Amino acid sequence: MIKGLFETHIDVEDLERSVDFYTNVLGLTQCHYEAERRIAFFWIGKPQEAMLGIWEKPKAEIDVRHFAFRCELVDVLNKSVQFLESKNLQPYNFLNSDNHEPMVFAWMPAVSIYFNDPDGHALEFIAILEGEERPELGVISYPDWLRVNL
Protein backbone atom coordinates (compact mmCIF):
# COMPACT_ATOMS: atom_id res chain seq x y z
CA MET A 1 0.00 0.00 0.00
CA ILE A 2 2.70 2.52 0.93
CA LYS A 3 4.42 3.98 -2.14
CA GLY A 4 6.63 6.62 -0.55
CA LEU A 5 6.74 9.52 1.88
CA PHE A 6 4.57 12.44 0.83
CA GLU A 7 5.20 15.03 3.52
CA THR A 8 7.14 15.87 6.63
CA HIS A 9 6.79 18.77 9.04
CA ILE A 10 9.20 20.68 11.25
CA ASP A 11 8.89 23.51 13.75
CA VAL A 12 10.78 26.76 13.21
CA GLU A 13 11.37 29.80 15.40
CA ASP A 14 10.89 32.51 12.75
CA LEU A 15 8.52 31.65 9.89
CA GLU A 16 9.69 34.43 7.55
CA ARG A 17 13.38 33.53 8.07
CA SER A 18 12.62 29.88 7.30
CA VAL A 19 10.43 30.71 4.29
CA ASP A 20 13.35 32.76 2.96
CA PHE A 21 15.78 29.89 3.62
CA TYR A 22 13.73 27.15 1.99
CA THR A 23 12.72 29.38 -0.94
CA ASN A 24 15.77 31.52 -1.68
CA VAL A 25 18.60 29.36 -0.35
CA LEU A 26 17.42 25.83 -1.15
CA GLY A 27 15.16 26.77 -4.07
CA LEU A 28 12.00 24.95 -2.96
CA THR A 29 8.67 26.16 -4.34
CA GLN A 30 6.31 27.56 -1.73
CA CYS A 31 2.84 26.16 -2.35
CA HIS A 32 0.84 27.44 0.64
CA TYR A 33 1.18 30.07 3.37
CA GLU A 34 -1.12 30.95 6.27
CA ALA A 35 0.01 34.02 8.20
CA GLU A 36 -2.61 33.65 10.92
CA ARG A 37 -1.68 30.01 11.62
CA ARG A 38 2.05 30.72 11.10
CA ILE A 39 2.59 27.86 8.67
CA ALA A 40 4.04 27.43 5.20
CA PHE A 41 4.31 24.49 2.82
CA PHE A 42 6.81 23.76 0.04
CA TRP A 43 6.87 21.30 -2.81
CA ILE A 44 9.93 19.08 -2.84
CA GLY A 45 10.73 18.08 -6.40
CA LYS A 46 7.76 18.22 -8.73
CA PRO A 47 4.49 19.76 -7.48
CA GLN A 48 2.32 17.26 -5.65
CA GLU A 49 5.20 14.77 -5.43
CA ALA A 50 6.41 15.52 -1.87
CA MET A 51 5.91 18.34 0.59
CA LEU A 52 7.61 20.03 3.53
CA GLY A 53 5.54 21.89 6.11
CA ILE A 54 7.05 24.43 8.51
CA TRP A 55 5.23 25.62 11.62
CA GLU A 56 6.32 28.57 13.73
CA LYS A 57 6.70 27.74 17.44
CA PRO A 58 8.52 29.31 20.38
CA LYS A 59 12.19 28.28 20.47
CA ALA A 60 11.68 26.26 23.65
CA GLU A 61 9.13 24.05 21.86
CA ILE A 62 11.33 23.19 18.87
CA ASP A 63 12.81 19.70 18.68
CA VAL A 64 15.66 19.54 16.21
CA ARG A 65 14.88 17.02 13.46
CA HIS A 66 16.63 15.39 10.52
CA PHE A 67 15.46 14.70 6.99
CA ALA A 68 17.12 14.14 3.63
CA PHE A 69 16.50 15.49 0.14
CA ARG A 70 16.87 12.86 -2.62
CA CYS A 71 19.31 14.14 -5.24
CA GLU A 72 21.09 12.94 -8.36
CA LEU A 73 24.41 11.23 -7.72
CA VAL A 74 26.37 13.69 -9.86
CA ASP A 75 24.91 16.60 -7.88
CA VAL A 76 25.82 15.16 -4.48
CA LEU A 77 29.34 14.28 -5.63
CA ASN A 78 30.18 17.30 -7.78
CA LYS A 79 27.96 20.19 -6.76
CA SER A 80 26.64 19.85 -3.23
CA VAL A 81 29.60 21.16 -1.23
CA GLN A 82 30.15 24.13 -3.54
CA PHE A 83 26.40 24.86 -3.56
CA LEU A 84 26.21 24.85 0.24
CA GLU A 85 29.33 26.97 0.65
CA SER A 86 28.03 29.47 -1.93
CA LYS A 87 24.92 29.84 0.27
CA ASN A 88 27.08 30.37 3.38
CA LEU A 89 26.10 26.99 4.77
CA GLN A 90 28.63 24.69 6.41
CA PRO A 91 28.61 21.23 4.82
CA TYR A 92 29.59 18.28 6.98
CA ASN A 93 29.60 14.55 6.56
CA PHE A 94 28.32 11.84 8.87
CA LEU A 95 31.79 11.34 10.36
CA ASN A 96 32.31 15.09 10.83
CA SER A 97 35.70 14.75 9.15
CA ASP A 98 37.60 17.90 8.30
CA ASN A 99 37.41 17.49 4.51
CA HIS A 100 33.62 18.08 4.24
CA GLU A 101 33.37 15.54 1.43
CA PRO A 102 30.25 13.43 0.93
CA MET A 103 30.42 9.99 2.57
CA VAL A 104 28.96 6.61 1.62
CA PHE A 105 26.61 4.67 3.86
CA ALA A 106 27.61 1.24 2.57
CA TRP A 107 24.60 -0.53 4.05
CA MET A 108 22.19 1.23 1.61
CA PRO A 109 24.41 2.10 -0.39
CA ALA A 110 24.08 5.88 -0.67
CA VAL A 111 26.32 8.94 -0.69
CA SER A 112 25.39 12.06 1.27
CA ILE A 113 26.39 15.40 2.73
CA TYR A 114 24.76 17.21 5.65
CA PHE A 115 24.06 20.85 6.52
CA ASN A 116 21.81 22.71 8.97
CA ASP A 117 18.86 25.03 8.47
CA PRO A 118 18.57 28.26 10.53
CA ASP A 119 16.92 26.37 13.42
CA GLY A 120 19.58 23.66 13.55
CA HIS A 121 17.59 20.93 11.80
CA ALA A 122 20.06 18.49 10.24
CA LEU A 123 19.34 18.38 6.51
CA GLU A 124 20.96 16.06 4.02
CA PHE A 125 21.47 15.74 0.28
CA ILE A 126 21.51 12.00 -0.54
CA ALA A 127 21.78 9.82 -3.65
CA ILE A 128 21.43 6.06 -3.86
CA LEU A 129 24.42 4.28 -5.40
CA GLU A 130 24.40 1.37 -7.79
CA GLY A 131 25.78 -1.86 -6.44
CA GLU A 132 25.15 -4.25 -3.60
CA GLU A 133 24.79 -3.25 0.01
CA ARG A 134 28.04 -3.66 1.96
CA PRO A 135 27.10 -3.09 5.63
CA GLU A 136 30.42 -4.50 6.83
CA LEU A 137 32.14 -1.39 5.36
CA GLY A 138 30.23 1.05 7.57
CA VAL A 139 30.55 4.68 6.50
CA ILE A 140 33.38 5.27 4.05
CA SER A 141 34.60 7.83 1.54
CA TYR A 142 33.33 7.69 -2.03
CA PRO A 143 36.82 6.91 -3.42
CA ASP A 144 37.04 3.99 -0.96
CA TRP A 145 33.58 2.81 -2.10
CA LEU A 146 34.76 2.86 -5.73
CA ARG A 147 37.91 0.91 -4.84
CA VAL A 148 35.97 -1.94 -3.20
CA ASN A 149 33.29 -2.01 -5.92
CA LEU A 150 35.41 -2.18 -9.07
Image (cartoon, rainbow, N blue to C red):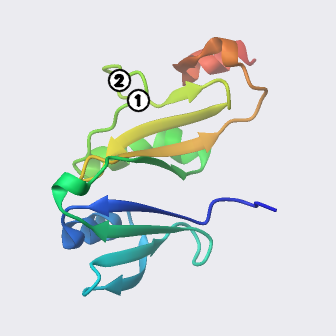
Q: Amino acid at mark 2?
A: Asn
- Residue 126 image-quadrant placement: top right
Task: Classify residue 112 as left or right of residue 99.
Answer: right
Indicate the secondary structure of the residue bearing disc 1.
loop
Label 2: few (<14), some (14–19) or many (≥20) C-alpha neighbours in 10 Å: few
- Residue 142 image-quadrant placement: top right
The CA distance from mark 1 to mark 2 is: 5 Å
Write down the residue under mark 2. Answer: 96
Q: Is mark 1 in CB contact (under 8 Å) with mark 2?
A: yes
Residue 147 in percent (x, y) is at: 66, 14
Q: Amino acid at mark 1?
A: Asn
Label 1: few (<14), some (14–19) or many (≥20) C-alpha neighbours in 10 Å: many
Q: Is residue 66 above or below residue 100?
A: below
Q: Residue at x 60, y 43 (%)?
A: 127
Write down the residue under mark 1. Answer: 93
Identify the residue at the far front of this view. Answer: 61
Question: In the rendered image, which quarter contains the N terminus?
Answer: bottom right
Q: Is residue 46 above or below residue 92?
A: below
Task: Classify residue 4 as left or right of residue 126.
Answer: right
